[in-house]
Amino acid sequence: MSKADLPGRTVLWRAVREQRRDVVLGAVLGMGHQTGEALVPVLIGVAIDRGVVDGDVAGLLLWLGVLAVVYVGLSFSFRFGARAGERASVTVAHRLRTELIGRVLAPEGGADDGRLPGELANTATEDARRVGAVTMALVVGVAAATGLTVGAVVLLRVSLTLGLLVLLGTPLLLWLVHLLSKPLERRSETEQERAARASGVAADLVAGLRVLKGIGAEQAAVARYRRVSRNSLTATLRAARAEAWQSGVVTMLTGAFLALVVLVGGRLAARGDIGLGELVTSVALALFLIGPLSEFSWVNAELAQGRASAARIAEVLGAEHAVKPGPSSEGDVLRRVEGRLRLRGLSYGSLTGVDLDIAPGETVGVVAPDPAGASALLRCLGRRADPDAGTVELDGTELTALGLAELRAALLVAEHDADLFEGTLLDNVAATAHARTGAPVTAAIAASGTDEVVRTLPDGLDTAVAARGHSLSGGQRQRVALARALAAEAPVLVLHEPTTAVDAVTEARIAAGVRDVRAGLTTLLVTTSPALLAVTDRVVLLDGGRVAASGRHEQLVHDCADYRTAVLA
């Protein structure tokens, strides 16, 4: 076993251990079911010997009654055993989905790096289901092994030759089946990776459909998805061929083995070594063994696919955190947030040695002509990444010394491309507010211009919003997202280009609204909008990764050519 297999095997083992009660119950009941199935041919053989060979009608009726009781028992064992195994399967899948979503949404981040949303969704659904199915496969495997064991013991009692044939031949057959599952495991892993990639690309294209249509890139997008989908189809067909080949070869080997058992039993009966009832029992047991052997083939396929899926889940769960969690998570460092920000020698991405002081309650504009500089600043302020050098402090405490939940309750970074959620418009605005109604929500709706949006919608604040806000226009979505950020009343709020999709008149109104609703609270406006920059206390120009100029908006427009180019061009 290679080191790369360990995380996936750990996921499998933990899934089985957490559901061991249902797995054990299902396995015990499955053993009872298979034992009953194996005893049916024995009871039929005894009934034939008593009723047909010996002419004992009473004995015949007695053994038929015993046979009926066994049928009832094995029926109930199958029903409740399958229920326990299926419960274990769906419970494991549910817990893995929950854990995966928790890891993706964890404040430390990192799980979504290099993975499209559709890929993560595929891992949380199909891969989780396949790992859950492993518990059911174990229940079936234990039951099948019991059936083979009971069948072999009965055959040993009927004939030492037949019993030894089954006992020695079955392990060899199972070993061959295990070898045949190896190509399926490899191809199943590739199949899942490419299927997840295709799902991710599809979700990505659907999310950006309006943009694609706007720039006339539909054909390029279709070509991209067709290429990815074709690769996924190829991998799926290869996995399907591997599974079909495995099933076909296993069926052929199983049939040949059972034919050998029947042939040996027939020769023994012809020589008189076994009686008529024993011959019937032997042939019926040989036919019965088709079931357990076929189940072993299915179990091997499920285990192969489960191992591949477990490895993919382990990669997400074990993804390195984008930032390390701080030592505090209960708010015992920031008992009262004043809102003083301090950047010292901040270097990250395109930023090099940025120094900046922001006083409590100050509204500061940040102009970054290079979008990469703005992105780097936002990532450090929101602690989605830690600086390569330098520090960011809030009220004299480094951000790395704060718990992530505590930090993000005190310092909110509202990204330019923030998504809305499925629900009502009010649900979205009040998502971060302490209450669904009240002065903060009402003030945020007015300040962001969302009140104009509300008046145009059929149900006002109760209007249903589609996932990611696609039922609204770009300008409407942007205003609702801004209202949500303002309603949070965060002590420190960082807004990134919150008005790019609205007209100039609305933008001026929003700028005044943001200034009024954030009075007395620290606010950073990372933007190149003159309307927003005009309402700030001062503006900082980031150029070449450093602070190149600082002052009032009007002063910089008059004195700084680089600033004029950035905000007025």
Image (spheres, rainbow, N blue to C red):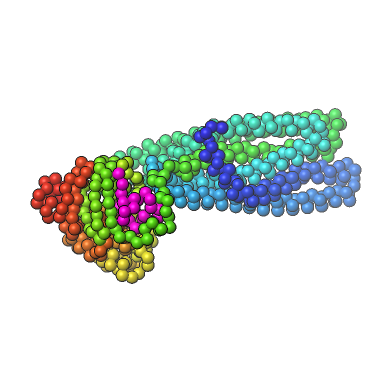
Q: Quadrant of the N terminus?
A: top right
Residue plotted at (52% across, 39% down): 7
Q: Nearer the viewer, residue 194 or 490?
A: 490
Figure quadrant of residue 278: top right
Residue 322 place in picture, x, y as percent:
39, 44
Residue at left offset 30%, top offset 60%: 338
Q: Residue at x 45, y 38 (%)?
A: 193
Residue span colored magenta? 390-415
Furthest-bottom residue in this view: 438
Residue 519, relative to residue 244: is it above or below? below
The number of callouts visible is 0
Q: Position of residue 459 (x, y in %)?
A: 33, 68
Seen from the viewer's position, the closer of residues 380 and 142 is: 380
Q: Is residue 367 left or right of residue 233?
A: left
Viewer can see residue 31: yes
116 or 246, nearer to the observer: 116
Judged from this view, the residue extending furthest toward the left is 558
Left or right: 527, with 202 as reference point? left
Does residue 393 show up magenta in the picture?
yes
Instruction: Give percent across and percent down for residue 85.
Output: 62, 49
Q: Nearer the viewer, residue 332 or 102?
A: 332
Which x, y percent locates residue 423?
38, 61
